[in-house]
Each structure stands twice: as C-alpha cells, then as structure tokens.
Amino acid sequence: MMMNIVLFGPPGAGKGTQSQNLIRDLGLVHLSTGDLLRAQIAAGTPLGLEAQGLMNAGLLVPDHVVIGMIRHRLEESPDAAGFIFDGFPSVGC
C-alpha cells in the first residue's frame, strides 16, 4: 500500500520537522519542489534549463514544469513506500 502525504502550512510551522519524522518512521521519499528545481538546474536537464530561464527573467516557474520534475522523481522511485510532497501544490493556487 502506497501512502502519499501533503503538508500545508506557513513557513516556520514545522512542516520540515514533521517531514523528517515521517520519512524516518514510514520510509517515505521526500519530494521538495525547491530541491527538485535546484537539482534539475544543476544537472542541466531540459526542465531545469527551462526553469532557470524563467527564474532569470524574474518569472515564476509554471505548474507544468514543476509537475514534469515531480513526474520524473516519481518514475525514479517505483518501489517507494510513498511520498511526502513539500512545496507543491502551492498555497494560493
């Protein structure tokens, strides 16, 4: 059985702390959109380059780019017990 968790809350509410506890206790994979963006940019992937160009122009990275990065990470973890989604969907969408 796969378990997926989304944590919502303002900065400093303890989402990161609770994520670490859940990862430790349940063996879940942590999906942070910020981490994904930085990793994709550093790796020079097509999605990373698209995101970098948008950010350099002062624009927000659109959902379809972030979803593509999440999809890629999900596909890399076929045996995961589940995922914690950190930072997406964005509050206010």
Image (tube, helix red, strand yellow):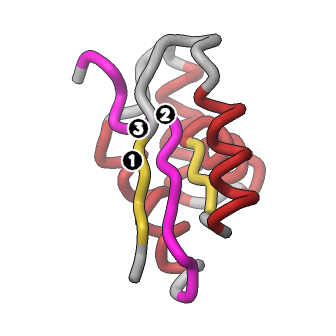
Query: Looking at the image, do the residues carrying marks 1 and 3 touch, with CB atoms under 8 Å apart?
Result: no
Which residue is drawn at the image coordinates 77% and 49% (left, top)?
Answer: 42
Disc 1 or 3, which lies upstream in sequence? 1
Secondary structure mostly seen in the magenta stretch = loop
Would you say 80 lies left or right of 68 here?
right
Q: Quadrant of residue 91?
A: top left
The residue that disc 1 covers is: 65
72 over 51 or under it: above or below: below
Magenta residues, start to end: 79-92
Q: Which mark is residue 39?
A: none
Q: Residue at x 70, y 60 (%)?
A: 25
Q: Position of residue 18 (x, y in %)?
A: 64, 37
Mark 2 residue type? Gly
Judging from the image, what secondary structure is the residue with disc 1 in? helix
The image quadrant where one finds the C terminus is top left
Residue holding disc 2: 87
Q: Does the magenta run of residues contain 88?
A: yes
From the image, tell me which residue sits under label 3: 88
Instruction: Using the image as rendered, state which of residue 65 and residue 93 is in the foreground.
Output: 93
Mark 2 in CB contact with mark 1 (< 8 angstroms): no
Furthest residue toward front? 25
CA separation in Å, label 3 and label 2 = 4 Å
The kind of residue tagged 3 is Phe
